[in-house]
């Protein structure tokens, strides 16, 4: 065995290092945590300014934690499952190292200062190392406001394009190796959309599976915290640390937690997979998206799954229920500040929040009735199939200079349906359209993240889209 | 004096002012678009068939049986 060396975030094979690869290499003594974190810091030095990955970096603390991890490895004692892995944290989730801003001029950064959110506590306990606070859209909603003094997250595949949001830095940071995994949050797709646009993997687990205390809320009944990383296996490893009840979050459920890594059998044999291409949701999309989606479905069929055409019920109504709920719950949180500090909010944030005033109490209640009804319809559908596949989006990453005029349509994203219903949903890369990543969405029954991750891992065991890297000098 | 109730919707500016919000004039076009979308979304929800007797279950508080086995509540 060669002596441990510093490593770049790209392995010797030319593929990016995944968390599971890195853990194996650390355990074998092929690399060191200090080398791993140093490489992550170097990647951030090279790309943070241009791509808008971080709001705050904790290089010194991360390197100190890496040194401690190396000591633990050297001692030869049992170590936690992700010891020494550099991670990014979306800046609406609190960490002890520094303030949480929500990428906003309005938020009081003293809120929960000096504390770790439960999810951060759990990642640290699993050995993860916090490298910094990743960019978000303000309060996890809207699009960039170029007039505000904050970084603009750019897509590593095409820097004039957006990363997607709102877990923006969590997406592009994984791509360039500033960290190997990250925490994002998802109220209408804010994990899965940047995962799709950036060409990585992201999981929204079942509502209530992961505690949200210590996270700035957007839509209380729709918010999820979840992992973003290169692979479904990496997301499984992170979810092993994140999942489970915590009394600090009243919406967190007391449901047994599976071993998600153990669920990765490497195949989908015997699974019945429903397929809805959602052409009705965005009929004008590029036929190339159809071809990518059909190819992804074929991969699942060739891997042994039984493919069953399905039509997700009440698509438009459920997407509307997501929006009515999200806008209403967000306005409840922001209204006092919105009245007092309108101009300090980003333009798309304040306009979106203000639109919550156009819904009545009856509208909000009706949205909850629709959610309940469609949950039951979809539960019935899931008696016929084990999983459902859809495209994550119908369009690739938009240009940043085109966002202001049309972002509110946010057309072509097919994620909010599952926030309204609560089912687990995984975004995995499925190819490229005009050089930009496109993504497959894999959805399962509530609390069956293991099956969702199993399918994603099986797909990634015979495809390599999730390991593709843009033509950046990752060594800086 | 005309006692017939007005059927004209309140203006967007008035609706926002009612909640203490005063956007700039250059933002009103965008907010009008959002209002139109909001009204369309609300109409979709209220027009949905089959939920006359549905209750707004707090499904996120616990694991409802219906979500697990697809059966009735």
Image (cartoon, coloured by chain):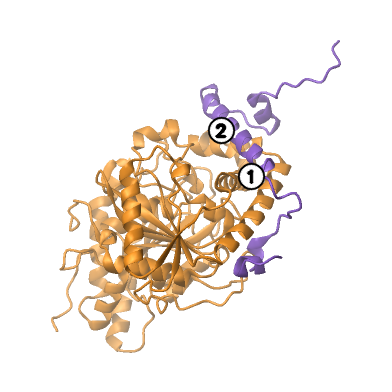
- Residue B2 image position (x, y, % from top left): 84, 12
Seen as rendered, the residue at the extreme left is A2
User: Would residue B30 appear left or right of A135 to someone viewing this image?
Assistant: right
Which mark identifies residue A247?
Answer: none
Subunit bearing disc 1 = A
Task: Give the labeled residue for mark 2.
Answer: B34
User: Would residue A22 appear left or right of B61 to someone viewing this image?
Assistant: left
Task: Give the labeled residue for mark 1.
Answer: A328
Label 2: element kind: helix
Let me know if residue A55 appears in the view: no
Q: Colour of chain B?
A: purple
Seen as rendered, the residue at the extreme top is B1
Q: Which one is nearer the viewer's eye here, A77 or A348?
A: A348
Q: Quadrant of the N terminus of chain A?
A: bottom left
- Residue A89 image position (x, y, % from top left): 42, 60
Q: Are marks 2 and 1 on the same chain?
A: no
Crowding at dot 2, Cα within 10 Å, few <14 / some 14-19 / many 20+, comes out as many
Q: Quadrant of the C terminus of chain A?
A: bottom left
- Residue A404 image position (x, y, % from top left): 42, 33
- Up-down: is A39 above or below A334? below
- Up-down: is B54 above or below A243? above
- Up-down: is A127 above or below A289? below
At 70% from the left and 30% from the top, the residue drawn is: B18
Crowding at dot 1, Cα within 10 Å, few <14 / some 14-19 / many 20+, comes out as many
Subunit bearing disc 2 = B
Label 1: element kind: helix
- Residue A284 image position (x, y, % from top left): 40, 37
- Up-down: is A2 above or below A414? below
Q: CA distance from mark 2 to mark 1?
A: 13 Å
Q: Colour of chain A?
A: orange
């Amino acid at each position: 065995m060669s002596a441990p060396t510093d490593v770049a975030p790209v392995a010797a094979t030319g593929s990016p290092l995944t968390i599971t690869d890195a853990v194996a290499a650390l355990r074998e003594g092929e690399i060191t945590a200090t080398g791993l974190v140093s490489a992550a810091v170097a990647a951030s030095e090279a790309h943070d300014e241009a791509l808008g990955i971080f709001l705050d970096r904790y290089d010194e603390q991360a390197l100190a934690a890496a040194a401690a991890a190396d000591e633990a490895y050297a001692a030869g004692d049992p170590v936690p499952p992700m010891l020494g892995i550099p991670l990014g944290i979306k800046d609406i989730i609190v960490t002890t190292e520094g303030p949480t801003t929500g990428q906003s001029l309005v938020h009081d950064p003293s809120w929960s200062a000096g504390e770790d959110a439960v999810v951060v506590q759990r990642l640290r306990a699993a050995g993860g190392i916090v490298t910094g606070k990743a960019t978000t859209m303000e309060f996890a909603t809207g699009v960039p406001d170029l007039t505000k003094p904050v970084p603009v997250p750019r897509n590593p595949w095409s820097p004039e394009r957006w990363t997607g949001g709102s877990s923006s830095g969590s997406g592009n940071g994984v791509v360039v190796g500033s960290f190997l995994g990250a925490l994002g949050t998802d109220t209408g797709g804010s994990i899965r959309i940047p995962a799709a646009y950036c060409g990585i993997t992201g999981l929204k687990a079942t509502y209530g599976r992961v505690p949200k205390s210590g996270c700035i809320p957007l839509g209380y009944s729709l918010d999820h915290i979840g992992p973003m990383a290169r692979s479904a296996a990496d997301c499984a490893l992170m979810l092993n640390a994140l999942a489970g009840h915590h009394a600090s979050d009243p919406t967190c459920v007391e449901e047994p937690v599976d071993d998600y890594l153990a669920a990765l059998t490497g195949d989908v044999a015997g699974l019945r997979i429903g397929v809805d291409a959602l052409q009705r949701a965005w009929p004008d999309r590029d036929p190339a998206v159809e071809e990518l989606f059909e190819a992804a479905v074929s991969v699942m069929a060739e891997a042994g799954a039984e493919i069953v055409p399905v039509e997700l019920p009440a698509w438009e109504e459920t997407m509307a229920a997501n929006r009515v709920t999200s806008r209403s719950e967000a306005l409840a949180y922001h209204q006092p500040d919105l009245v007092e500090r309108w101009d300090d909010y980003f333009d798309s944030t304040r306009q979106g929040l203000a639109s919550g005033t156009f819904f009545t109490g009856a509208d909000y209640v009706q949205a909850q009735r629709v959610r309940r009804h469609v949950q039951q319809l979809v539960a019935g559908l899931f008696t016929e199939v084990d999983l459902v596949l859809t495209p994550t989006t119908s369009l690739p990453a938009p240009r940043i200079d085109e966002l202001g005029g049309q972002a509110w349509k946010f057309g072509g994203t097919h994620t909010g349906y599952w926030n309204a219903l609560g089912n687990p949903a995984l975004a995995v890369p499925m190819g490229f359209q005009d050089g930009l990543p496109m993504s497959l969405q894999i959805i399962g029954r509530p609390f069956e993240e293991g099956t969702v991750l199993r399918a994603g891992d099986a797909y990634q065991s015979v495809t390599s889209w999730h390991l593709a890297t843009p033509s950046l000098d990752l060594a800086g | 004096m005309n006692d017939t109730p007005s059927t004209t919707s309140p203006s967007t500016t008035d609706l926002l002012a009612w909640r203490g919000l005063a956007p700039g004039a250059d933002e009103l076009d965008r907010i009008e678009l959002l209002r139109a979308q909001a009204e369309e979304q609300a109409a979709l929800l209220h027009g949905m068939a089959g939920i006359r007797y549905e209750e707004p279950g707090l499904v996120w508080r616990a694991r409802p049986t219906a979500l697990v086995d697809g059966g009735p509540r």
